[in-house]
Amino acid sequence: MDITITSVATASNETLWRAATDGKEAIGKTAGEALDGIRSQLGLEQNDLFIVYGKWQPDEYFTAAQQEQLGELMTRWRAARDEGKALSGEDQKKLEELVEAELAASGKRAEKLASEMEK
């Protein structure tokens, strides 16, 4: 199970944190508070979770150029969604390719981390 934690800006310029998985979500003043909220909804104990946190930054698996392009396409996708529209076919294809590339990169990062932990 994957739990995603993202920051959420409020109208009063406050930052809250949102944890989400499997159709459930929890909001907290900190990432930990949001995680605690989702964990309690799922009935998970502290020892049931293994958390890997990494700052999203360029690396050998997903470059700065790819991150920038993904960010631009996500901004366009959100704007289109909010207007009830879809991205152009070309933009949608590129967005899907970048999402797949980042997913593959996250797997490679996890493999590297697991290898380093075995040492």
Image (cartoon, grey):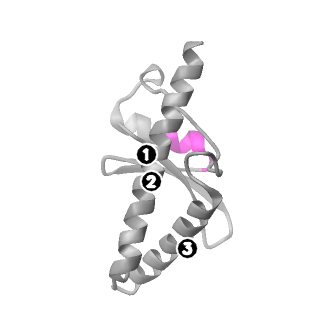
Asked if residue 40 can be seen in this view, the reply is yes
Q: Nearer the viewer, residue 4 or 94?
A: 94
The stretch in magenta equals 29-36
Predominant secondary structure in magenta?
helix
**Residue kind at label 2, given as amino acid type:** Ala
- Indicate which disc, 3 or 1, sits on the residue closer to the N terminus: 3
- Mark 2 crowdedness (10 Å alpha carbons): few <14, some 14-19, many ≥20: some
* Residue 32 located within the stretch drawn in magenta: yes
Instruction: Tell me the SS state at disc 1.
Output: helix
In terms of secondary structure, where does tag 2 sit? helix
Q: Amino acid at mark 1?
A: Ala
Q: What's the amino acid at mark 3? A: Glu
Q: Which residue is mark 3?
A: 72
* Viewer-closest of 73 and 28: 73
Kindly report the distance in space between the C-alpha atoms of the residues bearing marks 3 and 1. Answer: 20 Å
Q: Residues within 10 Å of mark 3 (few under 14, many from 20)?
A: few
Judging by the rendered image, the residue that carries numbered circle 1 is: 104
Quarter holding residue 98: bottom left
Would you call the spot at circle 1 few (<14 residues within 10 Å), some (14-19), or many (20 or more)?
some
Q: Vertically, is 23 above or below 95? A: above
The residue at the point 63 percent across, 47 percent down is 59
Farthest top residue?
Answer: 119
**Disc 2 vs disc 3: which is toward the camera?**
2
